[in-house]
Image (cartoon, rainbow, N blue to C red):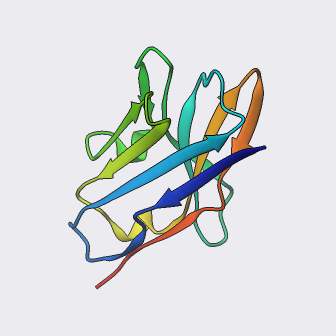
């Protein structure tokens, strides 16, 4: 079994910040890509950020300059630092990893940006 547990979601005002964490446990031997996706109401799930095992990062255009993804391989944890949050960032954020060409998903954590 592979388990992914997200934490750090919540309610924040526009312009504020949140930091998400996702810890992997269970049958973890060799993680390739770690990533964050999100799904807004009425929208498809979309990629937000990803990071390879060597530290190469990608960010969606909509979050460029505001979000930062990082990972701690010893702790098997991926992080997403979100700054300058906008109402459009509201949604359920999902952690995902790729191991041996298989993708695993967390349960998701709610992020709400509102006044």
Quadrant where the N terminus is found in the figure: top right
What residue do we see at 66% from left, 61% from top? 107
Q: Position of residue 8 (x, y in %)?
A: 40, 64
The correct choice, above or below, for 51 with respect to 66 in the image is above
Give the quadrant of residue 43.
bottom right
Q: Position of residue 44 (x, y in %)?
A: 68, 57
What residue do we see at 57% from left, 56% from top? 5
In the image, taking residue 29 as reference, residue 20 lies left or right, namely: left
In the image, taking residue 94 as reference, residue 105 lies left or right, namely: right
User: Number of marks in the image?
Assistant: 0
In the image, taking residue 65 as reference, residue 43 lies left or right, namely: right
The correct choice, above or below, for 10 with respect to 60 in the image is below
Quadrant where the C terminus is found in the figure: bottom left
The correct choice, above or below, for 29 with respect to 36 in the image is above
Front one among 46 and 99: 99
Give the quadrant of residue 31.
top right
In the image, taking residue 80 as reference, residue 40 lies left or right, namely: right
Front one among 66 and 81: 81
Front one among 1 and 107: 1
Residue pushed farthest top?
A: 54
Q: Position of residue 98 (x, y in %)?
A: 67, 30
What residue do we see at 67% from left, 70% from top? 42
Front one among 69 and 89: 69
Q: Position of residue 89 (x, y in %)?
A: 42, 62
What residue do we see at 24% from left, 62% from top? 17
């Amino acid at each position: 079994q592979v388990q992914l547990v997200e934490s750090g979601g919540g309610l924040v005002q526009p312009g504020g910040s949140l930091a998400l964490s996702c810890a992997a446990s269970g049958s973890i031997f060799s993680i390739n890509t770690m990533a964050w996706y999100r799904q807004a109401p009425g929208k498809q799930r979309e990629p937000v950020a990803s990071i390879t095992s060597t530290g190469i990062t990608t960010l969606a255009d909509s979050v460029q300059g505001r979000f930062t993804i990082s990972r701690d391989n010893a702790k098997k944890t991926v992080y997403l630092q979100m700054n300058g949050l906008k109402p459009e960032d509201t949604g359920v954020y999902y952690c995902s990893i790729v191991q041996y060409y298989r993708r695993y998903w967390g349960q998701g954590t709610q992020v709400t940006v509102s006044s």
